[in-house]
Every structure is written in structure tokens, then in C-alpha cells.
Amino acid sequence: MAEGDRLLKEFSVKKIKELAEGGAPFFLEHAFMKVHADNFASKAFEGKSGSKYPYKDDVVEVDAYIGEIVDALDKAGVLANTFVFVTSDNGPQLDSSPDAGYTPFRGAKGSAWEGGVRVPVIAYWRGMIKPGRQSDELFDLMDLFNTSLHLAGIANKNRRIVTSMASTRPRSCSPTTENPTARRSSSGTRKT
Amino acid sequence: MAMRMYEYKIHIKVVETKAQWLNIDMTTVSDVGLAPWLFNLYIDPKEEYPRRAPHERLPRLHGSRTQGSCCDVQEVSAQEHRAVGVCD
């Protein structure tokens, strides 16, 4: 269990290389087991955070793996064409507190209060998103579906009622409209 | 059950925690009959101050666009002006 995320990372790194060689647009979701439950760092990361809590070691481990995945995109030559989106699907699960995440807001996972639904997001897109930019735009994980299709140059022909960043910011997020081959892959990582 | 639009959030069915008990599966909750509860998350991100309408304490949110000046409401602090950003 503790080595699970290492194995998943090795899978994703290998898969990115294969998909990049294929030349077609691809979507990859890398869902971490850690910073969730159970929180036991792998052997290589035990004690790396300097904290007495395994959760903090897991944060260091997940951070390192995201770095390796992004590095794999770079080595495969697709990083400039890849939208990387790191987020969580809910607020912290406090039933394993104090060895858990933390929220400054009211409530936690399992409630409609901000502590349950407001999550951080890091969006990386070389040449498209200015480093350090902050946004408080409203966004839901469901938006990733249509956004990913749009970035891959796939039209929503049936006009299904699904939203995306493309629908709210058509110019800044729709390079495929002008050049279908400009952006061809997207990659998402999240905690489950 | 809640919905969000811009900085406003409305809880349609309000459930309050009676006993936190790990904050998930073991938590006991009770319904609050009076709903909806409305919040402006820009000035109340912790959802501690429900109001009858999102602009209750900040009438300029309506007035600024319909009546021209948002600075008529003297009780609104400068900090809140910056938080909402309508009085630049």
C-alpha cells in the first residue's frame, strides 16, 4: 500500500512516453492514493518532511511524483503542448485528523460548506498561463470534461449542456479554434 | 445542498453538525428548518454570517450600478471595499 503511488507514477511516466510517440492527442488522469487514506509514505520518503505525521511525508512524496510526471512530459517533447491541472475532488477528510489535510473554511469533506467543496487548483500551461497568476473564477471539476475535449480539438457537435473553460473564456482557452494542431494533449492529476 | 454564483452562495437545505465526531461518517447532523441561507463568500468566506439577501450589508452592490455611487454607504469599511472591488 505504501509503495502504491510509486508504482502508479512509474506507470504514468511509461504511458506518457508511449502516448507521445503515438502522435495523437491524449488525456491522462493520474489519481494519487496518498494525501488521502491510508497515509503511509513509501520507504524512500519516510521522514522526509521533518514532521511526525506520515501525511506530511506523503505531501513531499506526491510533490516529487508530480515533478517526475511533468519531467516525463518534457522529455517526451510534449510539455509545451500539454495542459497540466492539479487539484482535489473535495475538501480534507478530517476523520483521520490530525494526520489529515486542513481547511481554513467551515466544514470538511461530506458537507456543502466551503470546507467540503472549495479546493486548490494549480494550472500549468507553458506559454499560455502566466506563472504566478491567480484567479478566483468559479470552476467545477465537471468542466474538465468539455475543456479537455476542446483542447484536443474535438467539437461538441451535439451541443450537450456541458460547460468548460472554453465556454467562459473562448479566446484565451481556445487555441485549437485557430490552429487544431497547436495544443494536442492534456494531463490531469488529482487526489481521489 | 448549496449553489454558488459569482461570490454568492445559497444553501437551500441547511444541515448543521450536532456532533462533529470525525466530521464525516460518524457525524450527527440535524436539519435547520429555516432556509435558504445566503452568504457573500468574498466578505464571509467562513460562512458565519447568513443574511436574508447577499447584498444586505452591502447595498452598494446593487446601488453602485443603478444609482451611480457606491460610496454612499458610509458604514462599509475600506477593507470590504477592497474585498468586493466595486469601488475602485
Image (cartoon, rainbow, N blue to C red):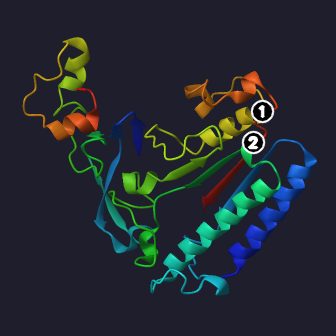
The residue positioned 16% from the left and 34% from the top of the image is B57
Q: Hey, which residue is sitting farthest right in the picture? A: A22
Residue A81 circle label = 2
Q: Is residue B20 above or below residue A141?
A: below
Front residue of this view, candidates A75 and A165: A75
**What x and y, as percent, mark residue A18?**
89, 56
Q: Earlier in the sequence, mark 1 or mark 2?
A: 2
Q: Residues within 10 Å of mark 1 (few under 14, many from 20)?
A: some
The residue positioned 55% from the left and 51% from the top of the image is A122
Drawn side of residue B84 relative to residue A115, left or right? left
Q: Is residue A40 above or below residue B42?
A: below
Q: Quadrant of residue B41?
A: top left
Q: Is residue A184 above or below residue A108?
A: above
Q: Amino acid at mark 2?
A: Asn
Residue A33 at least partly seen: no
Q: Do tags 1 and 2 sit on the same chain?
A: yes
Q: Hey, which residue is sitting farthest top in the picture? A: B67
Instruction: Find numbered disc 1 in the image and state the secondary structure of the residue it sits on.
Output: loop
Chain holding disc 1? A
**What x and y, as percent, mark residue B9?**
35, 39
Residue A69 at least partly seen: yes
The residue positioned 39% from the left and 73% from the top of the image is B22
Q: Which residue, given by chain and number where applicable, does mark 1 sit on?
A: A182
Q: Residues within 10 Å of mark 2 (few under 14, many from 20)?
A: many
Figure quadrant of the C terminus of chain A? bottom right
Q: Amino acid at mark 1?
A: Ala
Q: Quadrant of residue A16?
A: bottom right
Drawn side of residue A144 relative to residue B65, left or right? right
Q: CA distance from mark 1 to mark 2?
A: 7 Å
